Image: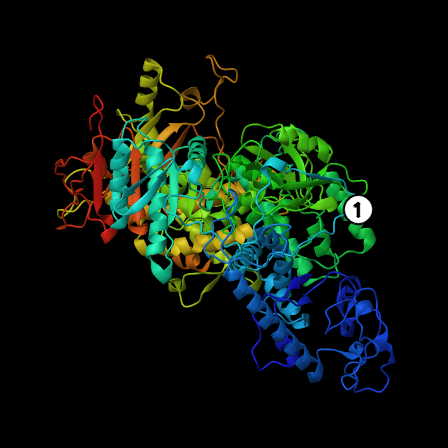
């Protein structure tokens, strides 16, 4: 990798070899070639062809020999052009230049003096040039921050940011190789070993995050270097056989200017694309860019109260009818305030993240469309599920040529299994490089399990392993299903492509020209999927011109050799193509405004572009050269570099300025934790918030059936009988559970088994009472009523109920607390259960997956239900006054089976009858011998509790394989959304609720607990010049909310006849 040494210069304590290196030096920092000093230009002392011997050794006659790539250290010209190479007539004492090398102080001092003299000369020239008047700025030129110009003799073949894009990948790989962003040493031996050791302990998403952060840092440094006025070298080394086509119209050729360009900041409060900011208005000193010609009065009111709430870290509720521009007002206001706050924070540069939520994925996509219409282009991310983002051909094939849609597969479980196997295979190959050859994260090998391996393929793998003498572990790994798209995330190529496609470049001057089609990082779910299928294709690059006859600034050429198509030869400075910043040299143009030009020559593409009279000109280009398997896109063909978009969007969300997601991702604590969404110092916007109460209640509620709990007992019992060994030790993250932070797998499973068994026994006892009760609440009377009133088979009937009724105890609400008292569970029990459940889940998720697909999915689903059961019951215990716990009964399959014990398989109605479900069998019980007693429990706790030696404790007695007529359910219902909303409000900075139908607002806010602490007044918006003052109704407080951020501003906007 050849890269300019723009890294941090070494201290004076280093030797002269490093002291003389300046910004003009070219160094070989790393290479995948055997002899890089043969292929690339190099100093004579580093030549890999001819031996070099210092003058201190007598035999140095070979120093005068040189290869075609050798350069003179002093003259900085090829050795063949050096006049003093073999004889130095001008300075015989110094000697010929062929002996010059950095290890001799004589040569380094002379080289340093020569460079100092050149720097002084260039400084005089620059001072003379600064006195000249600045030239007239051309319409596409970046705005200048200095009235300084560079030498008129300098020529620009491309813009500064174009040079940055070409160098970023090279320097990026150099830093990856050294594992040190400030290291400019060319000795990589020890660093490679350290890098390999650290990579073994990292998962692939962590490697991607590290690569991505380095790409961001290098981009920032490159932009800073460009801001300092670094010139772009002219590159005219075009192939003579290549046919050149210049898309420059003589009438519109930009005026040649040689002024130094500067990096344009993207943190303007009014937005990034002025052409979309049709109107700007100020609110409390914050300039808001507005994409429409006028600002309506309700939009000004919403902006005013939003800014006021954000400044004071308060919550705000907005109600405004449909069609009054809520979404635009909220988006523009919060983005303008975000940039104002970032600037106002001073050296801290505090960044507040915005999480914009709507009800469904389609509404979230509409919000992204609304963002593209505004002048703002922040760093953004859009969250989605594996169902929407998976691109694996065996799970969710994409495109018409990738096969039919796979049905009957659990995407979440399949993805987790393949990810786990991919991580295990990578770690094994990193640890044992001789098994499958050396493993490189930048070029990972394909795995035999990347596809959908069937029985025959697995058998072939076993036979091949037996013949080849492969170890049992290697044979096992070769038979596991893996994911090639997840494996590609470890490459620096993917990190750079993610940075290029989805991160707005701070060095791109989009403030000069642009429009609604200008992405600059804005994307939706479909863009992520297309990027994952082929990251090398850059889609929807919109170029805007001031006039239809203006030049795009592209120079095109034919492909070299047998390569057909149209390629970019050069991007000219201060033109629409350069301003966009997405196009690079050697990009192949695939489409022009949707028209396929994949195999077209440059002349045809040039004619097509010049014939377009309206903006924008939208280009699709492919990047990667002949080594890429990229296709035209959209035909279903996958690139060899296809990367998983699910983990890409997880990466983008960590550093995004605004994140779009359905609001159940934020409101549901379980989903929020699984997605890794952090609420600290965030602004949460809940658009279309009229369904927030229902979503919060559903998120806190749960329903668990008797039969699935019996399945849990069977699964937990299989792990509870495992013998204790060091191989089955689980790490407990919470050290308060005991003296040791580890526990045996059988002990953890046994504790969880006792917990589930308590609930099943409670359900079975209540169901037995229900079936034998002759009264109105009994099964017999309910069946008669169902037959009389023709009730549906899924009707539910109350058996027992524990909830917030009556007057409570000692003046305090009791809620569902008696239910937990009957089970004998306390808060400390749930603390222990939570820690044990986390450790048990970690063990099951990380174990080898050699089970069948259906069995693996079943265990994964049961594990999810176990975690949900413990989490919901823990919440009900802590907030028992807001929950009720009920035991419900429903017919197992149909009411006909509940009444008669049999069912008509064909069904007498419109729909067929549901089949009843049997209770699972626990070993050693079988279908032929269901009456066998379960094995006695060997756990020390159960043996100590047993009082009769001849009647030991046996777990799973209820799992007898029978088919009950009724099934009991445990229903935990959250009665109010207040606790979950209060938790959300306390963690984030500001909550914004907006909808067209939130009335009555006082009742909504009381139910959501958006109130200040007791004794603190409710904050009301003060009258403003644009808002008539009105008194808000008094609201009764309910639960005190913690923290100063719980204060509330409420706004109700009603419009009658155009008046507010």
Query: Residue 851 falls in which quadrant of the image?
Result: top right
Left or right: where does residue 209 sit relative to residue 100? left
Question: Which colouring convention does the figure follow?
Answer: rainbow
Query: Residue 780 falls in which quadrant of the image?
Result: top left
Picture layout, residue 986 above or below residue 899: below
**Screen quadrant of the C terminus:** top left
Left or right: where does residue 579 sit relative to residue 276? right
Looking at the rendered structure, the number of numbered marks drawn on it comes to 1
Which residue is nearer to you in this view: 582 or 814?
Answer: 582
- The answer to whether residue 972 is seen in the rendering is no
Query: Residue 492 falls in which quadrant of the image?
Result: bottom right
Residue at 77% x, 75% y is 45
Please state the horizontal and vertical placement of residue 323, each as a whole percent of the image.
Answer: 32, 26
Residue bearing the label numbered 1: 240
- The answer to whether residue 521 is seen in the rendering is yes
Please state the horizontal and vertical placement of residue 935, each as a whole percent of the image.
Answer: 51, 49
Q: Estimate how packed mark 1 is, as few (under 14), some (14 to 19) or many (20 or more) residues with alpha carbons within 10 Å.
A: few
Residue at 27% x, 43% y is 283
Q: Does dot 1 land on a helix, a strand or a loop?
A: loop
**Screen quadrant of the N terminus:** bottom right
Please state the horizontal and vertical placement of residue 978, each as a whole percent of the image.
Answer: 26, 42
Left or right: where does residue 163 sit relative to residue 601? left
Please state the horizontal and vertical placement of residue 268, each as a whole percent of the image.
Answer: 39, 48
Which residue is nearer to you in this view: 983 or 698?
Answer: 983
């Amino acid at each position: 990798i050849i890269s300019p040494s723009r890294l941090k210069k070494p201290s004076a304590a280093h030797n002269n070899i490093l002291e003389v290196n300046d910004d003009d030096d070219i160094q070989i920092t790393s290479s995948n070639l055997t002899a890089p000093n043969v292929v690339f230009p190099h100093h004579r002392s580093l030549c890999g062809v001819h031996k070099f011997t210092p003058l201190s050794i007598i035999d140095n006659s070979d120093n005068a020999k040189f290869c075609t790539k050798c350069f003179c250290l002093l003259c900085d010209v090829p050795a063949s052009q050096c006049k003093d190479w073999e004889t130095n007539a001008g300075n015989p004492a110094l000697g010929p230049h062929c002996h010059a090398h950095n290890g001799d102080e004589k040569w380094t001092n002379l080289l340093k003096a020569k460079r100092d003299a050149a720097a002084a000369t260039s400084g005089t020239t620059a001072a003379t040039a600064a006195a000249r008047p600045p030239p007239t700025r051309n319409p596409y030129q970046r705005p200048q921050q200095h009235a300084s110009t560079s030498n008129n003799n300098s020529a620009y073949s491309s813009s500064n940011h174009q040079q940055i894009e070409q160098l970023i990948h090279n320097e990026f790989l150099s830093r990856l190789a050294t594992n040190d962003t400030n290291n400019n040493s060319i000795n990589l031996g020890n660093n490679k070993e350290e890098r390999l050791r650290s990579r073994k302990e990292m998962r692939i998403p962590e490697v991607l995050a590290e690569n991505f952060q380095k790409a961001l840092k290098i981009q920032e440094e490159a932009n800073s270097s460009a801001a300092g006025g670094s010139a772009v070298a002219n590159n005219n080394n075009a192939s003579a056989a290549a046919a050149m086509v210049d898309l420059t119209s003589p009438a519109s050729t930009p005026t040649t200017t040689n002024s130094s360009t500067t990096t344009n900041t993207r943190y303007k409060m009014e937005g990034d694309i002025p052409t979309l900011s049709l109107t700007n208005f100020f609110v409390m000193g914050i300039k808001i860019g507005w994409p429409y010609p006028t600002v309506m009065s309700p939009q000004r009111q919403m902006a005013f109260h939003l800014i006021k709430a954000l400044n004071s870290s308060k919550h705000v509720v907005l109600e405004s009818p449909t069609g009054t521009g809520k979404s635009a007002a909220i988006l523009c206001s919060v983005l303008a305030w975000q940039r104002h706050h970032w600037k106002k924070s001073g050296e801290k540069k505090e960044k507040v993240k915005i999480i914009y939520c709507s009800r469904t994925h389609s509404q979230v996509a509409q919000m992204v469309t609304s963002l593209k219409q505004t002048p703002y282009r922040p760093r953004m991310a859009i969250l989605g599920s594996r169902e929407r983002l998976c691109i694996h051909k065996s799970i969710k094939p994409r495109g018409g040529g990738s096969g039919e849609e796979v049905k009957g597969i659990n995407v979440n479980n399949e993805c987790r299994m393949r990810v786990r196997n991919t991580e295990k295979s990578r770690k094994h190959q990193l640890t044992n490089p001789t098994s499958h050859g050396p493993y490189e994260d930048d070029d990972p090998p394909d795995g035999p399990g990347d596809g959908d391996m069937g029985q025959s393929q697995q058998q072939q793998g076993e036979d091949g392993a037996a013949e080849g003498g492969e170890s049992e572990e290697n044979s096992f790994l070769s038979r596991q299903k893996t994911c090639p798209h997840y494996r590609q995330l470890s490459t620096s190529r993917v990190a750079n492509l993610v940075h290029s496609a989805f991160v707005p470049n701070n060095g791109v001057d989009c403030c000069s020209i642009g429009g609604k089609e200008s992405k600059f990082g804005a994307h939706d779910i479909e863009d992520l999927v297309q990027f994952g299928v082929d990251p090398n294709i850059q889609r929807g690059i919109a170029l805007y011109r001031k006039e239809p006859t203006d030049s795009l600034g592209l120079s095109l050429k034919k492909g070299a050799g047998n390569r057909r198509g149209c390629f970019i030869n050069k991007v000219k400075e201060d033109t629409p193509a350069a301003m966009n910043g997405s196009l690079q040299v050697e990009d192949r143009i695939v489409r022009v405004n949707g028209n396929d030009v994949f195999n077209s020559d440059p002349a045809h593409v040039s004619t097509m572009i010049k014939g377009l009279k309206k903006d924008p000109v939208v280009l699709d280009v492919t990047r990667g050269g002949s080594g890429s398997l990229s296709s035209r896109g959209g035909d279903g063909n996958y690139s060899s570099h296809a990367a998983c978009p699910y983990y890409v969007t997880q990466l983008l969300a960590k550093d995004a300025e605004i994140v779009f997601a359905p609001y159940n991702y934020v409101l549901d604590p379980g989903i929020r934790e699984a997605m890794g969404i952090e609420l600290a110092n965030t602004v949460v916007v809940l658009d279309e918030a009229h369904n927030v109460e229902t979503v919060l209640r559903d998120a806190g509620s749960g329903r668990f059936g008797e039969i699935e709990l019996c399945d849990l007992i069977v699964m937990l019992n299989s792990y509870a009988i495992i013998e204790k060994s060091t191989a089955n030790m689980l790490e407990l993250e919470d050290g308060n559970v005991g003296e040791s932070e580890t526990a045996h797998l059988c002990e953890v499973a046994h504790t969880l088994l006792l917990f589930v068994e308590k609930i099943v026994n409670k359900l079975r006892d209540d169901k037995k009472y229900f079936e034998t009760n002759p009264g109105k609440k009994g099964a017999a009377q309910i069946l008669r009523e169902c037959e009389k009133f023709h009730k549906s088979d899924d009707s539910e009937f109350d058996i027992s109920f524990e909830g917030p009724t009556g007057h409570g105890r000692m003046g305090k609400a009791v809620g569902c607390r008696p239910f937990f008292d009957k089970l004998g569970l306390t808060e400390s029990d749930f603390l222990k259960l939570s820690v044990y459940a986390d450790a048990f889940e970690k063990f099951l998720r990380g174990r080898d997956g050699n089970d069948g697909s259906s069995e693996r999915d079943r265990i994964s689903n049961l594990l999810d239900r176990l975690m949900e059961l413990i989490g919901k019951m823990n919440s009900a215990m802590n907030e028992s006054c807001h929950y009720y716990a009920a035991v419900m009964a429903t017919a197992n399959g149909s009411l006909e089976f509940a009444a008669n014990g049999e069912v008509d398989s064909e069904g007498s109605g419109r729909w067929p009858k549901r089949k009843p479900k049997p209770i699972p069998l626990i070993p050693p019980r079988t279908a032929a011998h269901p009456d066998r007693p379960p094995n006695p429990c060997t756990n020390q706790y159960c043996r100590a509790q047993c009082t009769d030696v001849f009647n030991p404790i046996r777990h799973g007695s209820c799992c007898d394989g029978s088919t009950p007529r009724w099934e009991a359910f445990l229903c935990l219902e959250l009665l109010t959304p207040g606790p979950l909303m209060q938790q959300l409000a306390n963690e984030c900075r500001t909550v914004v609720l907006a909808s067209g139908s939130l009335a009555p607002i006082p009742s909504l806010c009381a139910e959501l607990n958006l109130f200040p602490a007791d004794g603190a007044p409710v904050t009301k918006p003060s009258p403003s010049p644009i808002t008539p003052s009105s008194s808000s109704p008094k609201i009764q407080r309910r639960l005190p909310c913690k923290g100063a951020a719980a204060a509330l501003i409420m706004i109700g906007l009603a419009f009658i006849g155009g008046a507010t």
